Image (cartoon, rainbow, N blue to C red):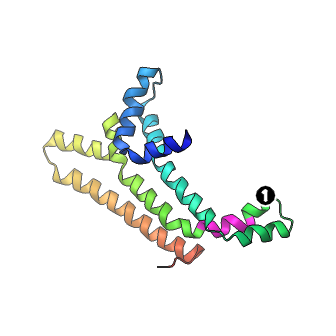
Amino acid sequence: TVGFLAEFIRGTPLLVQLYFIFYVLPDFGVLLPPLVAGVIGLGLHYGTYTAEVYRAGIDNVPRGQWEAAKACNLNATQTWTHIIIPQAIPPMIPALANYFIAMFKETPLLSAITVLELMNQAKSVANTYYRYIEPITLVGAFFLAISLFSVVLLRWLEHRYGRIER
């Protein structure tokens, strides 16, 4: 059932998932506030994708490292904290950062379930004053600034914690 749920989440658009969580679940007695439904929707959606990144990162650690840890009589906690995780994380950084940026850029979808997010507020200001260029451009610039900052942070993390082959 976990595999089916993961494939369902990966195979359907985020907007459909948000609608399902916010508008369909109340028919089954699960009533969630808009922000909670949005956080759950984004978390489930991106959690299924990042889980695959984590799995691939851990699978990328050579089998010999696991065997060496066992030969050195390290327990499971020591093996994970000192051997596996330090080798698995650097290759994961670019993919995880890309998912973070994508998730950030998809937050305007939360307005579809009545979450008052930034883009929705900009549209509200634009509709009130009949001036669309300024608020929409400001929000676009904000999203761009955060995305560019995230890219700079990604490059720093790549440089600091691991070499990424290109």
Q: Which residue is mark 1?
A: 76
* Relative to 156, residue 14 above or below: above
Asked which quadrant contains residue 126, the reply is top left
Percent across and percent down for residue 11 are 40, 46
Residue stretch rendered in magenta on the structure: 82-89
Q: Residue at x 53, y 56 (%)?
A: 52
* Relative to 76, residue 23 above or below: above
Q: Which quadrant holds the N terminus?
A: top right
Badge 1 element: helix
Asked whether, in this view, residue 46 is left or right of residue 138, the answer is: right
- Asked whether residue 5 is in view, the answer is yes
- Asked whether residue 42 is in view, the answer is no
User: Furthest residue to the right?
Assistant: 73
Q: Amino acid at mark 1?
A: Ala
* Relative to 19, residue 31 above or below: above
Q: Residue at x 57, y 62 (%)?
A: 56
Asked whether, in this view, residue 63 is left or right of residue 142, the answer is: right
Percent across and percent down for residue 164 are 52, 76
Asked which quadrant contains residue 105, the reply is bottom left
* Relative to 5, residue 69 above or below: below
Percent across and percent down for residue 144 are 33, 62
Q: Residue at x 48, y 24 (%)?
A: 30
Q: Residues within 10 Å of mark 1 (few under 14, many from 20)?
A: few
Please tell me which residue lies in front, 62 or 132. 62
